[in-house]
Amino acid sequence: MRCDGLFLAGLAHRLPATMDVDGAVADGRYDRAEQEADAYASVTVATDEAPPEMAVAAARLALGRAGTRPSDVALVLHASAWFQGVDYWPPAAYVHREVLGEAGRYAPAMDVQQMCAGAMGAVELAASYLAADASRQAALVTTADRYADPGFDRWRSDVRGIVYGDGAASAVIGREGFARLLSVSTVVDTELEGMYRGDEPFAVAPGRKVDVRARREAFAATARARLGSVADRTTSGLTDAVGRTLDEAGLKVDDIARFVFPNVGLFVLRTRYAEPLGVDLERTTWDWGRRTGHVGAADQLTGLTHLVESGAVTPGDRVLLVGIGAGFAWTCATVEITESPDWNS
């Protein structure tokens, strides 16, 4: 989807304090060989804030930076990948009530469940929603997660090469702002959804501890005969989504100043993301991501917020945001920085 007349008006994140990974290696929670391959330095760990509370904090800051009134927000989308603190409850409605209140009476609040591509998927949905009606002035996107025991082991629940951090991020999409939204698009391959389901039976209630490694082993036992190389399929999804998004913006890989990938470990980042696209690590946000860990669907928005706050991007720079979520979905967006906002970070 090529975007005309749409901008990122505000960005913010809410990240708790970091914890060095050395302690987790020393006490056996994080395998030393994995840490050496991943090269994570620290992860963000929330101790006293639930995901929706962090989302509200990020949203309030993003709206303030955008100068957007709550009454101007036409849509609220909240993305998450893990438990939000209460069963059978819509966290998007909580974000809406806390941030917009009665001023948002005519703005729908909806949850987006596309795992770690959720925030980027929400950006695409928000852009489509605004493009459909010129009277709609702005949309608010939030995402937040906390990967805590006993249900989720941030060091081992997912596959090798991914360690999880906690936090939230928010974006305001509007008719004017500091970064022009050039294009956004999604590619899916649902033949791979079993990678995160495995052979687990469908349960009647939540409660089992997440073990993606076991699920992937079960999936791999039959996947190759049916699907061929899973690695080739995931690489194809990535390159297809990136190529499509760049084509819609009229750009090439060499036109992109910075790439914001998921905050995976260094070996995975280099071999599964950067090298297939011909991208040097210096053009990524690796130095930032290795200090936060993989903050679910928030990585792209936290990474771009960091680039803007630190002055690492300036007017004229194009940035490619790459979101990837189990299922599988790849959602990418290209933005062009048009001004350096005066944010007190």
Image (cartoon, rainbow, N blue to C red):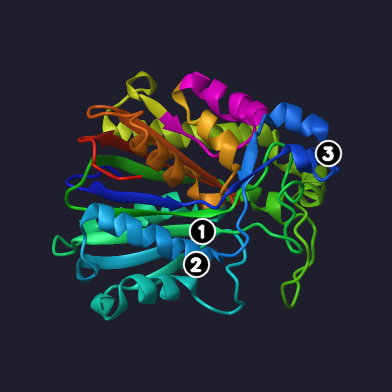
Return the x and y of residue 315 as percentages of the image width and height: 22, 29
The image's mark for residue 26 is 3
> At 36% from the left edge and 18% from the top edge, which residue is drawn?
254
Disc 2 to disc 3, C-alpha distance: 32 Å
> At 48% from the left edge and 31% from the top edge, which residue is drawn?
285
Crowding at dot 1, Cα within 10 Å, few <14 / some 14-19 / many 20+, comes out as: many
Give the residue type at disc 1.
Ala
Is 276 included in the stretch rendered in magenta?
Answer: yes
Q: Which residue is mark 1?
A: 144
The image's mark for residue 61 is none
Disc 2 to disc 1, C-alpha distance: 7 Å
Quadrant of the rendering where the C terminus is positioned: top left
Identify the secondary structure beneath mark 2: helix
Residue 231 visible in the picture: yes
Is 265 included in the stretch rendered in magenta?
Answer: yes
Bounds of the magenta span? Answer: 259-282
Give the residue type at disc 3.
Ala
Q: Tell me where residue 147 sits by quadrant.
A: bottom right
Residue 278 visible in the picture: no
Return the disc, 3 or 1, that comes first in the chain's sequence: 3
Q: Nearer the viewer, residue 36 or 212?
A: 36
Q: Tell me where residue 223 sits by quadrant.
A: top right
Confirm or deny contact between disc 2 and disc 1 (CB under 8 A): yes
Give the residue type at disc 2.
Pro
Q: Nearer the viewer, residue 162 or 314?
A: 314
Crowding at dot 3, Cα within 10 Å, few <14 / some 14-19 / many 20+, comes out as: few
Q: Tell me where residue 19 sits by quadrant.
A: top right
Return the x and y of residue 160 as percentages of the image width and height: 74, 38
Q: Which residue is mark 2?
A: 52
